[in-house]
Image (cartoon, grey):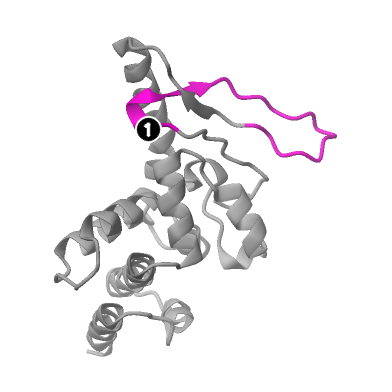
Amino acid sequence: MSRVISKSISLTPSLTCTHLRFLPFRTSSSTSSSPPQFPRMAAESSSSSSPSAASAIDFLSLCHRLKTTKREGWVRRQVENPESIADHMYRMGLMALICADIPEINRDKCIKMAIVHDIAEAIVGDITPSDGIPKHEKNRRERPRAKEIADLWMEYEENSTQEAKIVKDFDKVEMILQALEYENDQGKDLEEFFQSTAGKFQTELGKAWASEIASRRRK
């Protein structure tokens, strides 16, 4: 988003998303240096189906912002009708779904990681490198707390597994593929997006897909 404000997600661990509910949010006073407290999910101990349904819908309603928040890099380059964060994550999920089997890579984990890696942007917005936010501060703002989501998010951020490495490559591949499409459709020069990913792919699959995209750009 064009404005970057200090926000944090406070999600407490739960076994499943159907046992999560949102607690009311509190905002800090204007003079406080602490970030606002946003809706958090807490473990729901009731066996009633109503709280679980309400929790799921509350969470999904929050995620609606991923569909309406445009990717900031494209907005700043005045791309017409730029993709949303959800658009980006959806195609990354498809990449994980259709890629060839790779030994010792958990495809299901890759799909899940692809669809949650930017989920915090539903609250904090799309923070880009040009915003000048230090990496540790970006991580603090974006870090979710629901256990499975948090574990996947942290694994991705720390680039600590082969699944994280391939999903990070998907993140870059999806961006340059989108850049190519905007160049073709709108006559834009988006060279900087290609330059920003050059030499940064970590897997053979990522390198192969990026090379294919680059070859189509030159035609």
* Direction from residue 71 to residue 142 in the image, left or right: right
The residue sitting at the right extreme is 31
Q: Is residue 206 visible?
A: yes
Q: Which residue is mark 1?
A: 15
Query: Per the image, is 119 magenta?
Result: no
Residue type at numbered disc 1: Leu
**Position in image of residue 44 (x %, y %):** 43, 19
Callout 1: few (<14), some (14-19), or many (20+) C-alpha neighbours within 10 Å? few
- Residue situated in front as seen by the camera: 6 or 4: 6
* Direction from residue 213 to residue 61 in the image, left or right: right
Quadrant of the rendered structure where residue 211 is? bottom left
Quadrant of the rendered structure where residue 106 is? bottom left
- Residue situated in front as seen by the camera: 7 or 73: 7
**Position in image of residue 72 (x %, y %):** 50, 58
**Position of 89 relative to 30 (above/below):** below
- Residue situated in front as seen by the camera: 39 or 215: 39
**Position in image of residue 58 (x %, y %):** 41, 24
* Direction from residue 79 to residue 50 in the image, left or right: left
Q: Residue at x 76, y 39 (%)?
A: 34
**Position of 39 relative to 142 (above/below):** above
**Position of 219 relative to 118 (above/below):** below
* Direction from residue 106 to residue 179 in the image, left or right: right
Q: Residue at x 39, y 12 (%)?
A: 46
Q: Quadrant of the C terminus?
A: bottom left
From the image, give the main secondary structure of the stretch colored magenta: loop
Q: Residue at x 81, y 40 (%)?
A: 33
Query: Per the image, is 17 magenta?
Result: yes
Span colored in magenta: 14-37
Q: Residue at x 40, y 52 (%)?
A: 152
